[in-house]
Image (spheres, grey):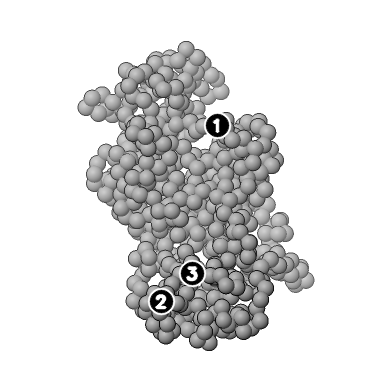
Amino acid sequence: MQRILLLLAAGSLLLGCGSSRPYTLGPIKTEDPDRRPIPEPEETAENMYWDRINLSVFEQIEKPTNLNWTGRTIGQWLGVAGPDEADNVNVMDEPPNSSWYTRRHYYNEMTERQLAIGPNKRDTVGVAAGPDTSGTWTVVSGKSEGASRGFVMKDPRGDTYVMKLDGPQYPGLATSAEVISTKILHAAGYYVPQNTVTFLDPDQLRVGDEATIDRGTTERAMTRADLTQLLAPYPRTEDGKIRILASKFVDGKPLGPFDFYGTKDDNPNDRVRHEQRRELRGLSVISSWLHDTDRRAANTLRVYTDGGYIRHYIFDMGSTLGANASSPKKPVHGQAYIIDQRKIPRALLGLGAVRFPWWHYDASPPYPSVGYYRADVFDPGEWVMSYPNPAFEKRTRRDAFWGAKIVMSFRDDDLAAIVETAQMPRPEAEAYLLDVLQKRRDKVGRYWFRRVNPLDRFAVAAAPAVVAARTGGRAADVPALVFDDLSVTYDLVSGDGTVYHYTLRHDGDVLQTGSTRQPAVPLRGDGSALADVLDRRGATQPDDRVVRVDLRTHRADGHVSRPTRVYLAWPSRKPPRVVGIERK
């Protein structure tokens, strides 16, 4: 047994080792070439239930028999192997733009209006987003998939929409959650459909000649009576309309869902295993904030675009925030999997004496349009979906830091602008939801920024005057490595009492050490400009002129971060530039 453990540990150590240098002197990869034209694939069938069973049972049973998983787990336990990091990040520790994700709000700050518009393109040209309400809506079919009730229709413009209804007892619950989470995920960088709250006049509906409806295992022609029965339980506004969510069909040919593991054989551009993608691993942190407990394959979509490549969409946000489709969530949501192998042994061995925390939570939603969505019982490190997600399970602290900085980029006014577009039935409910979003956001930031040094947005610029003065030079003459301390930027901690300790190294030798209370490191060595130091050291080739800056953050409460390493290339007679980042 001891020999087996040693072999597994050795294997995991090899898995944790890498030979590539953590920086590049060439162009930094910001675009993934996964949008090259490919032949049009066939559509794959969607199974709404198989992925639940597979991920909850079979994948969990299979894990211990996977030597890669077992070896790395034992190696980490023994302290000889590191975590299995994401495969698609560049030297700046960022995922490039791709058919999965594109940089938006955190990287290029969006205005409140842009956030409120989200993916709803028509707003940008002065036309109201959502379906055209000026004429007749033609019902194409009943909505046969998903937990929410509804139908599929075409508006007078010819655009096709899935129309989703709230639960009759919870007006505004799922429709509000869908609109808010869609716009947050869009701003976070994901591809999502256009989702809009609209108000339906039943008299403007017409059942199409070829409209059908599923009834269990049979399909038959849809009638006006079916629509009347569907809409009967729903409350009307004073002018007789019904609140409904319009989800516009995306452009392109739907190909079915994508999995959160493996790759697709029909897509030559799909070269990174999905569970190894930073944007899918980091999505776990965003999902914890939004309480998105149903983020699985059934709620995704691959679309063959007019450009001849496959784009990957996140769909169906009706089970985010306090909604569980047409009804509110329960206290167990986010606390445990539906089938939770981590909890079952405790319950069995405890012979009924083990009482899980969520049994004691008040399950009464304060507002029907918000549902069960709380900040006080939220633990960012323990939150889970209803079903295991392979990419979420593979998340490392670096992935979580990336997700957390996306979450923290939504300021209070940003969230208010987004929440307002949900047109929630009561202003008190809107205020409550906004408060919970803000508190859960801050919990996410505090938790993950404590586990990874939260320094980011590194650049070389003129040193702040107070930093330059300590070097005996003018700000214009003293270049500095400047950065943002995200915990300070987003008001999670005070900058008072925070000190940044730095060490400059070249070829293993220490050039300078020091500390600063400003987020800026003067780039000097032995009192001289680093360019002069490198010249004296005989560094003439580009590969020789790279300086490593190690940064640790010391907080007033005594917390000391692990180091963040920033690599600076200093070409002869040219300004330095950041060429790599390592987060420990």
Q: Which residue is mark 2?
A: 475
Across and down, in percent, residue 239 comes to: 23, 25
Q: Is residue 246 above or below residue 95?
A: above
Rendered image quadrant of residue 28: bottom right
Which numbered disc, 1 or 2, marks the residue closer to the eye?
Answer: 2
Is 584 left, or right, of 499 in this rendering?
right
Q: Is residue 238 above or below residue 16?
A: above
Q: Who's the residue at 28% across and 29% down the image? A: 235
Kindly indicate whether the residue at mark 3 contacts the one at mark 1 (C-beta within 8 angstroms).
no
Q: Which residue is mark 1?
A: 252
Q: Which residue is mark 3?
A: 460
Across and down, in percent, residue 365 comes to: 32, 46
Secondary structure of the residue carrying tag 3 is strand
User: How far, Cα to Cα, is label 1 from label 3?
Assistant: 43 Å
Across and down, in percent, residue 567 comes to: 57, 71
How many numbered dots are placed on residues in this image? Answer: 3
Secondary structure of the residue carrying tag 1 is loop
Q: Closer to the camera, 373 or 206? A: 206
Q: Closer to the camera, 460 or 549? A: 460
Which numbered disc, 2 or 3, marks the residue closer to the eye?
Answer: 2
